C-alpha cells in the first residue's frame, strides 16, 4: 500500500508541475517556477530517496511529450536536473520530512541554492555555452538567447529569490498541514 501511495504522490506532483509548465504562456510559466520548486521540495520530503528527481522527471516527460516543440528534450532534462538539485541540497543540508516538522531556514537555503543552480545551468546552456563554442551559426539559432549583463543579474537574483519563496512555502505547508501524513 505504501508503494502505491508514493506512486500516487509522485504522479500527482509531477502532473501539477506539468500543468504549471504547459498551460501558461511562455513568459508566465517561467515566473511560475515557484510552483515547480514547491512541489519538488514536497515530493522530496514525502519520498525520502530521490522523490524530487522522480517528480521532476514525470513533470518534464509529460511537458516534453505534449508540447511537441524542438525544446522537448531540453524541457525533460532541465526538469529532471532540477529534481536532482533539490534532492542533493536537501540531502546536503540533512533535511528530512518528519512528524516534528522541518527546519524552515535550512529548507529555504537548500531551495535557494537548488534554484540558483538550475537557473545558472539552464541560462548557461542557452546563452553562454553557444557563444563559447561558436554555435550561433548552426540551424538551431532560434533556440539560443543573447546574453546580457541585465539578464545575467536577473538570473542570479531571481533564482535564489524564487527558491527562498518556495522553501518558505514548502516548510509552511509541511509544518502546518502535511507532516502528519504518513507515506
Image (spheres, helix red, strand yellow):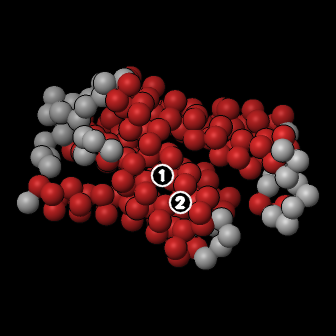
Q: Please tell me which residue lies in front, 79 or 18.
A: 79
Residue 155 falls in image quadrant: top right
Residue 83 in view, yes or no: yes
As drawn, the residue found furthest toward the left would be 1
- In percent of width and height, residue 120 lies at 65, 37
Residue 94 falls in image quadrant: top left
- In percent of width and height, residue 48 lies at 25, 40
As drawn, the residue found furthest toward the front would be 133
Numbered tag placed on residue 130 in the rendering: none
**Left or right of 145 on screen, residue 49:** left
**Left or right of 10 on screen, residue 70:** right
- Callout 1–callout 2 Cβ contact below 8 Å: yes
Q: Residue at x 38, y 25 (%)?
A: 92
The span from disc 1 to disc 2 (Cα, nearest Å) is: 6 Å
Q: Name the residue that disc number 2 marks.
A: 76
Q: Is residue 156 above or below residue 128?
A: above
Q: Residue at x 42, y 30 (%)?
A: 89
Residue 176 in view, yes or no: no
Q: Residue at x 33, y 44 (%)?
A: 50
- In percent of width and height, residue 142 lies at 82, 63
**Left or right of 11 on screen, residue 100:** left
As drawn, the residue found furthest toward the right would be 137
- In percent of width and height, residue 102 lies at 26, 29
Label 1 packing within 10 angstroms: few (<14), some (14-19), many (20+): many
Q: Please tell me which residue lies in front, 152 or 126.
A: 126
Numbered tag placed on residue 80 in the rendering: 1
- The N terminus sits in image quarter: bottom left
Q: Is residue 40 above or below residue 139?
A: above
Q: Residue at x 77, y 43 (%)?
A: 129
**Left or right of 26 on screen, residue 37:** left
- What is the secondary structure assignment of the residue under circle 2? helix
Q: Is residue 24 above or below residue 10?
A: below
Amino acid at each position: 500500500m505504501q508503494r502505491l501511495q508514493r506512486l500516487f504522490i509522485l504522479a500527482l506532483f509531477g502532473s501539477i508541475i506539468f500543468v504549471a509548465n504547459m498551460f501558461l504562456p511562455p513568459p508566465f510559466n517561467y515566473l511560475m517556477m515557484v510552483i515547480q520548486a514547491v512541489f519538488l521540495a514536497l515530493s522530496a520530503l514525502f519520498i525520502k530517496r530521490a522523490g524530487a528527481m522522480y517528480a521532476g522527471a514525470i513533470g518534464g516527460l509529460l511537458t516534453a511529450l505534449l508540447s511537441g516543440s524542438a525544446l522537448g528534450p531540453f524541457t525533460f532534462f532541465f526538469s529532471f536536473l532540477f529534481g536532482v538539485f533539490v534532492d542533493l541540497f536537501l540531502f546536503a543540508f540533512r533535511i528530512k520530512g518528519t512528524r516534528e516538522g522541518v527546519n524552515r531556514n535550512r529548507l529555504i537555503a537548500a531551495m535557494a541554492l537548488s534554484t540558483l543552480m538550475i537557473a545558472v545551468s539552464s541560462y548557461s546552456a542557452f546563452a553562454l555555452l553557444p557563444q563559447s563554442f561558436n554555435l550561433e551559426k548552426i540551424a538551431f539559432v532560434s533556440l539560443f538567447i543573447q546574453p546580457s549583463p541585465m539578464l545575467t543579474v536577473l538570473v542570479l537574483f531571481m533564482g535564489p529569490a524564487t527558491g527562498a519563496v518556495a522553501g518558505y512555502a514548502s516548510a509552511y505547508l509541511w509544518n502546518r498541514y502535511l507532516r502528519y501524513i504518513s507515506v
